[in-house]
Image (cartoon, rainbow, N blue to C red):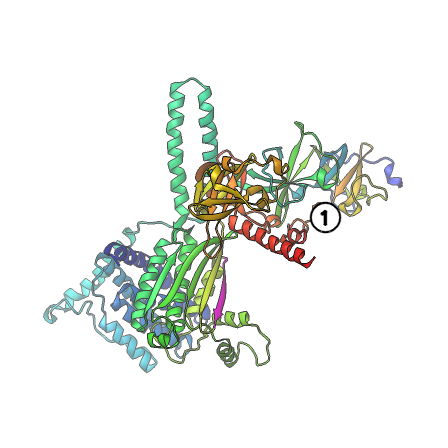
Amino acid sequence: MSGQEMGLPDPMTTTTQNETGEAERYLVFSLNGEEYAVPLLKVKEVIALTDITPVPYTPPYFKGIMNLRGQVFSVIDLRLKFKMSKAEVTSETAIIILDLSPLSLGVVVDSVDSVLAVEAKDFDPPPEIEGQVQMDYLMGVTKKDKKLILLLNIERTLGVEDLKIIKNQQMNNV
Amino acid sequence: MNEDIEQELKNGFLEEAKELLSNSESCFLNLEKAKDDPSIIEHLFRLAHNLKGSSAAMGFNDLKEFTHTLESLLLKIKKKEFSINNEIINLLLRCNDHLQLSIEKLKDDHKAECKNWILLQELELTIKEGHTSIIQTDVVDKSSEPPDEIDFHQLNLKGHIQDENKKSMVARDESIRVNLSKIDQLLNNVGELVIMQSVLAQQKQQIPSPLLQKTVGQMTKIVKEVQEISMGLRMVPLKGIFQKMQRIARDTSQSLNKKIELILSGEETELDKTVIEKLGDPLVHLIRNAIDHGIESPEDRVQLGKSSVGHIYLQAYHKGGQIVIKVQDDGKGLDAEKLKHKAIEMNLISHDTTIDEKGIFQLIFASGFSTKSSLSDISGRGVGMDVVRTNINEIQGEIDIESRLGEGTSFSIFIPLTLAIIDAMVISHNNDRFVIPISQVNEAIRPEKEWIFYTKESEEILCLRNETLPVLRLEKLLKKKMGGLQTLTPPWTCLALIVREAGQKPFAILVDEILWQQQVVIKKLGSELQHLPGVSGAAILGDGKASLILDIFELNQDRLKELKKYQQYHTKQ
């Protein structure tokens, strides 16, 4: 698409400063074969899949609550949220605990891959045609080894407003 | 009230007073440096006011008299009728010393006399004349020594006694102040420790080593004790403070010639220690106000058709993730019109501000607000409610006022649950585990086949000792997917939890099994789950898994509302 695609330096190695500013670091994970990334600063922790207690009156993508060292976190299945098919749990399946003040949440992903430093010049706007993820969920895209990594707007993705499971919703469903 | 409680209360008061007075001493010293800072005066004035009230309640009359006079002086200072100079500060510091001395004396003997005529006279003269007047004597305790042998002996004695007392005050500190965050860390770690050790205890069976078994067994006991102690560190039942209120209610009602009955409920409810401490003063003020302003005189009450005895209900309960403490009276209620006029008079609101009833009620908390025209010992200075709101804000709580003219008023204090322990039962249903507070369950029985009936709508009914209770299935309450009605287990193979709540029809819930009973720490759910109906929080069970704490009442309410809607919809057809 643009001339920048030629001779892209490998953003994986160092956080090189350039004239347009510092690089932002992202955590890259996989969902259904595609790679996504969220800003590293928002990541509190990454843990292996653990016991999750289901919660009634919640949408299907809401997996439930879990205990992490005495604190209770809500966990969301990102696949279901993106309306992908449900996947088999493998040894790679992980939970990323995100800090989205004032909320903290965990999201289940297929695997957590790497940490990526993306410089401003490697940051492209979201493409017109998208895969299975809707447009406003993406902040942008970047490329690594010819593979497209979708940089998620995690607050928008999780619909931080929708997450307030409102009583009215249930009442209106009579 | 029996002896022991009285002793305990008095000692408690003396402990608190000691702390207050060391705090006030530094305030007085600060005042000297920052003469114009109104907040210090406010603070000191409030301290004196509280000390006066509590010492009166405890029956320490000397103390009460003294602080009353001191308070008047502080009020004058607050109103700027006095300029703060060296002499005033000296006088105030001497007052503080006297108070500290008195407290020490009272600690040894609750009936000790603590009069200091000289100081009292000085105070009164100062107030009257508008400047300090120091009465020159060196006599320490007028009551004891015969006049001849005063001079030299006395002078030395004064200095000596002061030192001695200061020394003993330092030595007798039996408690220490601990940073709450340290306790929090401790509690978190202890929680983890308990989980780890239960895992260890389970695993020990695998390894055939008697020494290991024995050691793990002992460790279990010790960890249990550590857990109990550390949990106990912060949580205190409301019982202590509620009983204190009994005394306050009694004394206040006597001095005002009103007949009052104070009815307590929920005193086993436990709260964080700091929260309880902050609740003390507000509750005292609320109860006194209820007796003073709320409850009418016995004659008036009879005339109005009420019982001659006024009722004040002091309740504590859990509700939707918060603790509610309610002070309710059946007195004359708040007159919104009168309040509005007073507020306009005080320039709190203007003539044409539109304000609803609730807003008017909240005006009571404004500093200095009082509809009473004369001062009384109890209230009227317009300080009480201000303290109430400040204290409640400090514990991140809210206070709500409801009132009906002629019928009564209720003040509800809502306190967020940061850390609260409840007795609960862990139940299993459809292989899910839930936690139900024991307070919500009246009985648990395994019904016999003959006790279950079906109505024509195929609803299940339980006939228990001549009472018919509708039977609800937990799946229905939680709106969980059921595998069709046919696969419902017969009700007599389940356990029925009988739920009774005041003012509502009792019902029974069917659950598969009660697993065990334990104390759980309520963990707040994130804001994304705040509006879940029927769930008041989460708990972490012994095996480390998170579990939901159900609020059965709320679940039922929800169901009833929906039922109503459904019926309304159908009758329209």
Quadrant in which the C terminus of chain B is drawn:
bottom right
| Residue B101 located left or right of residue B306 | left
Q: Quadrant of residue B44?
A: bottom left
- Say if residue A26 shows up in the picture: no
In the image, residue B390 above or below residue A81 = below
Q: Position of residue B204 (x, y in %)?
A: 44, 23
The foreground one among B309 and B473 is B473
The foreground one among B131 and A37 is A37
| Residue A158 located left or right of residue B58 | right
Q: Chain of mark 1?
A: A
Q: Amino acid at mark 1?
A: Arg
Specify the farthest residue to the top.
B208
Q: Position of residue B557 (x, y in %)?
A: 55, 53
Q: Which residues are magenta?
A: B396-404
Specify the farthest residue to the front.
B456
Q: Secondary structure at mark 1?
A: helix
For disc 1, the marked residue is A156
